Image: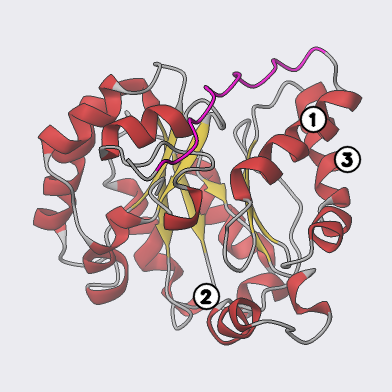
Amino acid sequence: MWNLKSWQGRFLPHPATPPERLRAYAGWCTAVEGNTTFYATPTRETVASWAEQTSPDFRFVLKIPKVVTHEHRLTGAEEPLRVFLDAISPLGPRVHALWVQLPGSFGPADLPVLARFLRHLPAEHRYGVEVRHPAFFDDPRALEEVLAPHGAEWIPFDTTAFFTTPPTSDAERDAWTKKPRMPLRTRALTDRPIIRYLGRDSVERTVEGWQRWVGITAGWLREGRSPTVFVHTPDNADAPELCRRFHAEVRARVPELEPLPQPEPIAPQTLF
């Protein structure tokens, strides 16, 4: 989540322990995607260390484990879900939302399953659902009607800028085969919209592609919403810097937006 090798010595100290890297990351950005929880549930002790390294207003958007969403497809996975919810409890208010990413094979016909799953989730958390079946975008009202009673958000993954032209690097070619080609969605359902955006290796093209989101995010802020935006590129090497640039562009339109923290300087690496 915050241990990318290419960030070490640039955005994060190196060498450093994982907690030290998280503390440094939190100086660059005020939210993080919890992708690692998709693959394995961390221990409560590990999660408690995350809480110690971040302020109470830092935002964790944690992905519910794949054993729940992909292997059990939201049915009969009460025990792994219970273990996960117990493990993340030390984060307290830092859990901004729990992220239900559904497999591409989970389509509109499965909406009753999703509705039943959402009904049984604890009310203490907020939830966001990311779908990857294109039929949901043909008639979005069906999914919206399932999410609305639970105050759950529809998390779009905007890959439209990425797929505009063919890849030009190994990282882009790898992402080309793995990332979903989803229709663009820009509507927020709740007061806490969450956006995932994928750019290109080129900073200029990445910035060009996010311009619509600068305007949309600024509009949400003026409406009193509290959006969270995650900026990705194929290798994510510059992601913390790009996130701060996105924030600066939004803040230029909404000056009352709180500034991001100032990151601590990273000492240069030495041989001795």
Sooner in the amino-acid sequence: mark 2 or mark 1:
2
> For residue 215, which numbered disc appears in the image?
3
Which residue is nearer to you in this view: 144 or 231?
231
Sooner in the amino-acid sequence: mark 3 or mark 2:
2
Q: Secondary structure at mark 2?
A: helix
Q: CA distance from mark 3 to mark 2?
A: 31 Å
Magenta stretch holds residue 263: yes
Expressed as whole percent of the image width and height from the top left, the position of residue 66 reads 28, 66
Q: From which residue to which does the magenta span run?
A: 256-270
Which residue is nearer to you in this view: 211 or 16?
16
Q: Secondary structure at mark 3?
A: helix
In the displayed structure, 29 sits above or below 260; it is below
> For residue 248, which numbered disc appears in the image?
1
Q: Identity of the amino acid at label 3?
A: Gly
Expressed as whole percent of the image width and height from the top left, the position of residue 191 reads 63, 30
Q: Identity of the amino acid at label 2?
A: Pro
Which residue is nearer to you in this view: 127 or 5?
5
Point 44% across, 30% down: residue = 24
> Does the CB distance between marks 3 and 2 fall below 8 Å?
no
Q: Is residue 155 visible?
A: yes
Q: Identity of the amino acid at label 1?
A: Ala
Q: Residues within 10 Å of mark 1 (few under 14, many from 20)?
A: some
**Closer to the eye: label 3 or 1:** 1
Point 47% across, 41% down: residue = 32
Q: CA distance from mark 3 to mark 1?
A: 12 Å
Image quadrant containing the C terminus: top left
Q: Residues within 10 Å of mark 3 (few under 14, many from 20)?
A: few
Q: Is residue 195 visible?
A: no
Q: Which residue is mark 2?
A: 108
